Image (cartoon, rainbow, N blue to C red):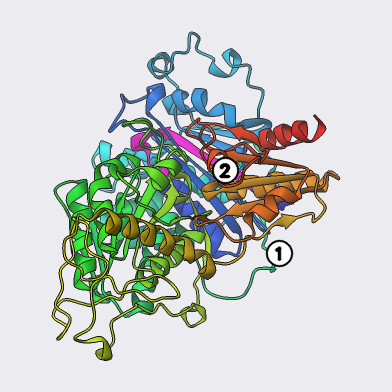
Amino acid sequence: MSEKVKMLSQVAVRFSGDSGDGMQLAGNIFSTISATVGNDICTFPDYPADIRAPQGSLTGVSGFQVHIGADRVLTPGDKCDVLVAMNPAALKTQYKYCTSQTVIIIDLDSFSENDLKKAMFTTMNPFEEMNIKNEVISAPISSMCKESLKDSGLDFKAAMRCKNMFALGLVCWLFDRKLSLAEDMLKEKFAKKPEIAAANIKVLNDGYNYGHNTHSSVTTTYRVESTGKKEKGLYMDINGNKATSYGLIAAAEKAGLKLYLGSYPITPATDVLHELAKHKSLGVVTVQAEDEIAGCASAVGAAFAGALAVTSTSGPGVCLKSEAMNLAVITELPLVILDVQRGGPSTGLPTKTEQGDLLQALYGRSGESPMPVVAAKSPTHCFDAAFDACKIAVEHMTPVVLLTDAFIANGSAAWKLPDLDKYPAIVPPYVTPDMAGKWTPFQRNPKTGVRYWALPGTEGFMHRIGGLEKSNETGAISTEPENHNLMTKLRAEKVAKIVDYIPLQEVEGDKDADLLVVGFGGTYGHLSDAVSMMRSNGKKVAHAHFEFINPLPKNTEEILRKYKKVVVAEQNLGQFASYLRSKFDGLKLYQFNEVKGQPFNTSSLVDAFTKIMED
């Protein structure tokens, strides 16, 4: 019997198992293979915060969902078409992401009586207990992996670490994926351990052959072809943290500055520190400081010395950095504060996503401390958002908060490598030789309100700045009431004038829409998909997604007052909606708010927005 090949326009696969089962690696390889053959992709790593939960426990399940499509893909998908469940705990916790048509792949060897008890099953038949009637591929993955590597010289524990590759091989067979790309990735990952690479490659091929030779209880395999509509160029599978890192490097190159990162490790932002530390050859300097405020304070020092300075963290770290962030406000030095948002408050949900830091980014500091805020909307957009944040920071001599979140920071998509020649120049507002002798530290460009930047050691421009208020005229320490009032206003006006240097807000969808959906940050894909689904059903809907939060684009009020109904959807309890109301008197807004630590569910958005339209 030979299986049939069915063509699909899109498919979602979810890999799940114990934290030590290598589901993130299997998912990453499958997504990269898919991106390489021309599919669009969106991934969602979903793993627990526990360092290592008890093996087989419900709290220790790690998941990775990848959505691949022939055309544009913006979300990892509400549900999956294939679920890989390496143990009963994975089946129990991840089945909620399945439909009645989902194919489930299990490691039969991991469904023993003891395994079932760990997952809180009360019978020996978990499928009957959960009333699961899906098509199931039961493969003895562990025992076949052991048999496959019996002559490899690896011990049992090391051999079992390869079973994720058996599952990946089986999935590659199911979706007609060639293994050569996966083999190359494994050789690269385990370049210093060729015996481990060889073992993983062998098990990968055995998994593929198992599916091919047994047909694994199914008579149909699937293929997702590329439509060929993508813009030609060189693409790579990139996650948001790496794209952010590349955007920072690109901005430093455009500005002619060294890039400095002062950071302290914190989930989910640490990978930015790891990535930038690899690029010393590009003039990048990274320092892992003793704590959050030290990381930020060192970055302020680097900015004073003339670097493009960055500090990276998540919400709790922003709390700790706030004093040093304010030092950058009062000294008016360029600094980018990257906040990769996660579930809070406190330690909260450190591996989950949220948008709860917006008001902290806008207002979470002592005194009047205005700061531009930029928000990235997708893994690939993190590059542009980082570049934009750097351009604002340098050209307007101000600290800037760059908001991403765990979903887009850890998630990945197919990214076309950009042509930097098409990106705008970044021009630092340096002092000029003719200013020597008459320049003062807070002398400003009359048009932009930006103070001129004198690098230490520049002859004729010796000066002092610091955390104490300074005289607008001389730069000396000043406690004069009128001077402080003036300096406070000048700093606020400088940030407000940035509105003249950012683009107008764009609106997607129907120009005569009955409902405008408003969002910011990493919810873009889900909101865009929801609006597209509603429009395909005959609804008149539009979508405005904000990258620039402070200042808001010039046409923001015009857009918000144009539509009959406006709903602001965000993963908090209404922070952006509250901010918009504070800016525009009498603005009526509907709200859709969820704080679940998970990305939005597109179908739930459609239901909620439809109800608002019909009320």
Instruction: Residue lying at the far top in this picture: please name it.
Output: 122
Displayed quadrant of residue 300 = bottom left
On screen, 559 above or below 566? below
Residue at x 27%, y 46% (from the top left corner): 322
Q: Residue 58 placed where, x, y %?
A: 41, 22
Residue range of the region highlighted in magenta in the rendering: 10-24
For label 2, the crowd category at 10 Å Cα-Cα, with few meaning under 14, some 14 to 19 and many 20 or more, is many
Residue sitting nearer the eye, 551 or 160: 551
Residue sitting nearer the eye, 476 or 95: 476
Q: Is residue 536 visible?
A: yes
Residue sitting nearer the eye, 51 or 392: 392
Residue at x 61%, y 75% (from the top left corner): 232
CB-based contact (under 8 Å), mark 1 and mark 2 = no
Residue at x 36%, y 60% (from the top left corner): 491
Displayed quadrant of residue 437 = bottom left
Residue 583 left/right relative to 56: right
Residue 364 left/right relative to 133: left
